[in-house]
Amino acid sequence: MRGLSDEELMELIKGDDPKLAFEELMDRYASRLVNFLNRYTGSRETAENLTQETFLRIYKTRQHYEPDAKFKTYLYRIATNLAIDEFRKKSRRREELREDFSDSKSENPGPHEKAVSAQRAEKVRECVMKLDEKHRIVLVMKWFEGLRYEQIAKILGVSVGTVKSRVHYALKKLEVDLKPLLNGDK
């Protein structure tokens, strides 16, 4: 099964014995999807639940899957929609991102370096979480997932120009919010 494309695996999942093909797709994408959703929601537990829900939806609707687009785009679109729904349900709760933004250069940082690094990471997390959801999601997809503008546009159902504009705005907003940190202020 390892040599098959995602789209070929989805065709097998539509068949009589979908178990192995479905497990292969989950092996390929589950951890990446949890990481993506964790960065977006700021909660590992929520990310894991949304990942399970994403794969459950894919399995339940497997007979309707048409390989018009890449499976990865299909997967991320479902996950993104679930994450946006979850985010709205929680009344725009601002949780910290769990990703370590540490920029420590030392291999064995001392207590002071660790404290400064933790303060900086906290400030970056706060600034990213202050972005509204449409700007935060494109930033997470571009920066952390390494998706191309075209992929993000397909996932979100917007134009490439809109994605570029949102990334640009998000980066400008972060630049303003993080300017004191970049200048050595706290």
Image: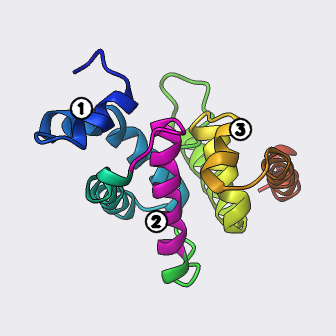
**Residue 114 image offset from top left, x and y in percent:** 53, 42
Task: Please name whichever residue, 102 or 138, is drawn nearer the observer in this view of the structure.
Answer: 138
Which label number is shown at residue 150?
Answer: 3
Classify the position of the N terminus by image quarter: top left
Q: In terms of sequence position, does the residue under pointer 1 or pointer 3 come before the other? A: 1
Describe the element under mark 1 as helix, strand or loop.
helix
Amino acid tagged 1: Glu
In which image quadrant can residue 45 be found? bottom left
Task: Please name whichever residue, 85 or 109, is drawn nearer the observer in this view of the structure.
Answer: 85
Residue at mark 1: 24
Crowd class of label 2 (few under 14; some 14 to 19; many from 20; radius 10 Å): some
Residue 99 visible at all: no
Q: Residue at x 30, y 51 (%)?
A: 62
Q: In terms of sequence position, does the residue under pointer 3 or pointer 2 come before the other? A: 2
**Are the residues tagged 1 and 3 within 8 Å (C-beta)?**
no
Describe the element under mark 2 as helix, strand or loop.
helix
Distance between mark 1 and mark 2 Cα atoms: 22 Å
Whether 80 is among the magenta residues is: yes
Residue at mark 2: 82
